[in-house]
Image (cartoon, rainbow, N blue to C red):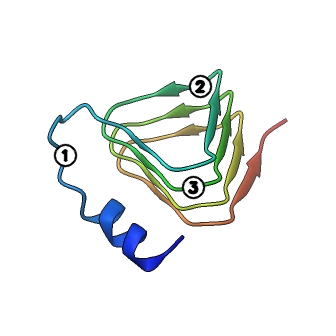
Amino acid sequence: MKIKDFFRMKFFSFKNRNEVIIGKETIIKRSLIEKKNIFGSKNEILNSKIGFGTYFGSDNKIDGLEIGKYCSIASEMKIITG
């Protein structure tokens, strides 16, 4: 991700408080996504529940996880539950 894109996403002013920002090549399947979340590029979110106001960096793989409100997930995380 370019620095310019990072700052654009980080300091994006939400015109609609319910908006979710999803980066390029991000895949979200069979998941419950609450409002006002930001997903960087190349994320794969499967079978998960993501709470309100959560931020994801890029290049993450999340499968079968419940993440609470206002969390920040770093880049290049792999979290897979059994």
Cα gap from disc 3 to disc 1, whole angstroms: 19 Å
Q: Secondary structure at mark 1?
A: loop
Going by the picture, which residue comes out furthest to the bottom? Answer: 3
Q: Secondary structure at mark 3?
A: loop
Circle 2 — which element? Answer: loop
Residue that badge 2 annotates: 31
Name the residue at 43% across, 78% down.
3
Which sits earlier in the primary sequence, circle 3 or circle 1? 1
The residue nearer to you, when weighing 9 against 67, is 9
Which quadrant: the N terminus? bottom right
Amino acid type shown at disc 2: Ser
Rendered location of residue 81, percent (x, y): 79, 40
State which tag comes first along the sequence, 2 or 3: 2
Left-right relation of 53 to 55? left
Kindly identify which residue carries mark 1. Answer: 14
Q: Amino acid at mark 1?
A: Phe
Contact (Cβ within 8 Å) of mark 3 with mark 1: no
Residues tagged 2 and 3 counted as in contact (Cβ below 8 A): no
